[in-house]
Amino acid sequence: MDEKVYTLEEIEAFCLGRLPTEKQKAIEERIAEDESFQHRVGLIRSILEGFLAMATEDLEEKMNSWSGGLAAQEDEELIEWYLTDELGPKAKQYVEERRKTDTAFDTLFQSQKRLLEGLDAIQTDAFANQLTAWEREAQEETPVRSLNPWIKRLSIAASIALLVSIGGWGYMKNQYSNQKLFASLYQSPNIGGTLGGATIDQFKEEFSAAHRSLQGGEYAVAIRQFTTLSNELEGLELDPLAKTYYEQNVDWSLLLAKLAGNQINDGFRSELARIAGDESHEYRLQASSLQKKLDSFWR
């Protein structure tokens, strides 16, 4: 197996297809045999492709077009959920099948994938530290000139400056806004048939009304309504399954109303952590996903 220690500059040239044929082939063979080296090249390729995508003259125009129009916005969100593994099997299959027949959708998919991979990579201290470590290893084994420009070029500060210069910062910040997160997590409930009894029928109507407020963007009203529903649930005579359903839906819907209404405080965080840590809670995975996104670099 090829034991040469390649510098970041050589890996960059390989990813861009700029090496002589023999060297290009040697690296390809090394990738096939060495999993660690394959991972290294993969990281460099993802950050490089992210930069190349951001450097295209029409990227800002693409970003604006992705955000404009309901259909385009839905496609953008669908792709993001696919890439972050937040879709169910049927939805994943829909995305994969559509990519085969819809050229514009596939182009958007590829662009967003490259962009997000690059942005994810550059925001991590671990990635920057890894680059430095690799360069140090390479210099110890293969004498090269001091500090390869890749290190500076791929630093977090430089990356942020690049994002700001092309307008990408605003785009990514928008993807993690409270309203965007709410839209990606909210689902209209299946209210079902009549529960029976005047008290329970009244609760069901109030439950429906609270969701209508949430769907209509009346977040302050929805917060009051879901808070009232939470208190009323204690006195309702429901079978255990139905009671659990309503309790968990009201819990989650109240949190989403506060999220969309920009009411994120310590109490909100505590309740979110409770749901995310409860393995029996229907919305545990969504709560865990929201926790990560609230702590994102882009918030």
Image: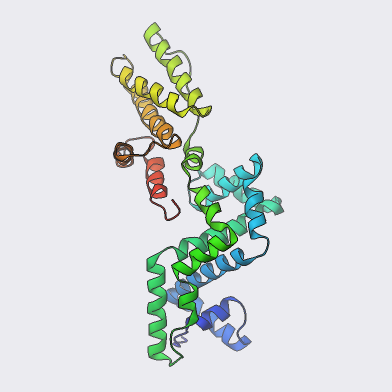
Q: Residue at x 40, y 6 (%)?
A: 198
Question: Residue, x 39% and y 90% (percent of image)?
Answer: 141
The residue positioned farthest toward the top in the image shown = 198
Task: Say which quarter of the image contains residue 56.
Answer: bottom right
Residue 79 drawn above or below residue 248: below
Rendered location of residue 61, percent (x, y): 67, 55
Residue 196 shows in this picture: yes
Q: Residue at x 47, y 42 (%)?
A: 181
Q: Where 117 falls versus 270 (above or below)?
A: below
**68 or 232, which is in the foreground?**
68
Q: Residue 12: give x, y in percent of width and height.
A: 54, 78
Examine the rendering and report whether any part of residue 29 can be seen.
no
Q: Quadrant of residue 271?
A: top left
27 with respect to 198 (left or right): right
The residue closer to the viewer here, 124 or 196, is 124
Q: Residue furthest bottom?
A: 143
Figure quadrant of residue 225 = top left
- Residues 201 and 30: in front is 201
286 w.r.t. 19: above or below:
above
Residue 250 place in picture, x, y as percent: 38, 27
Colouring used for the render: rainbow
